[in-house]
Image: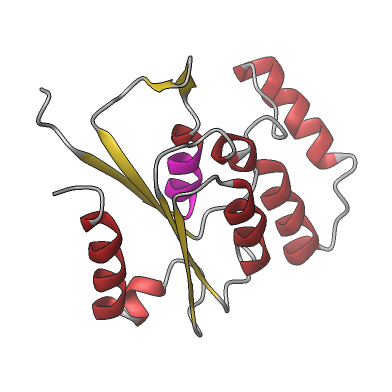
Amino acid sequence: SRSTKMVVHGISMGAATTMMVSGEVEHGQYQHPFIKCFVEDCGYTSVWDEFRGELKEQFGLPPFPLLHTASWLSRQEYGWDFREASALEQVKKCTLPMLFIHGDADTFVPTWMVYPLYEAKPEPKELWIVPGATHAMSYKDYPQEYTEHVKKFVGKYIH
């Protein structure tokens, strides 16, 4: 209905999905006009960047040949490769408001990833770097502050 107002809020892979959805526009219009804003918490720039980082961090392996092969197999099986699954490319197309949240102690999805995402996203946007929070722990570590940040941001766009 016309009165429906929705926020898309995702954490980790859900945040990457949130950002992927945020760029789904056709002729400058969202397919889902009831979506009013987005909140992404510790999402990665792209599947390629995330897997490359994990291969190096967890296993000490370079991206070639394993990541290239897995990406190629994904293209064969699902019709998309790891470089295409880019939240960074999608947020560039997002005109709706987005709140970016990332812990400054995140090593699983490294904190540096939030900065190019934030820079790529057109206004309106906000960024909250959570002190001491590791991956997907911002709410657990700071439930009151987290709730207040999200409530204040969302309240600007949903009345």
| Residue found at x 33% / y 72% | 139
Q: Is residue 59 left or right of residue 38?
A: right
Where does the magenta region start and end? 12-19
Question: Which residue extends farthest bottom?
Answer: 132
47 up-or-down from 147: above or below: above
| Residue found at x 57% / y 72% | 106
84 up-or-down from 150: above or below: above
Q: Is residue 3 left or right of residue 154?
A: left
Residue 14: say if magenta.
yes
Main SS class of the magenta portion in the image: helix
Position in image of residue 51 (x %, y %): 70, 49
140 up-or-down from 25: above or below: below
Q: Quadrant of the N terminus?
A: top left
Q: Looking at the picture, tell me which residue is in the foreground, 50 or 76.
A: 50
Residue 135: say if magenta.
no
| Residue found at x 63% / y 43% | 88
Q: Looking at the picture, tell me which residue is in the foreground, 135 or 67.
A: 135
| Residue found at x 31% / y 72% | 146
Position in image of residue 70 (x %, y %): 74, 33
Position in image of residue 38 (x %, y %): 37, 47
Q: Is residue 10 left or right of residue 151?
A: right
- Snapshot quadrant of residue 2: top left
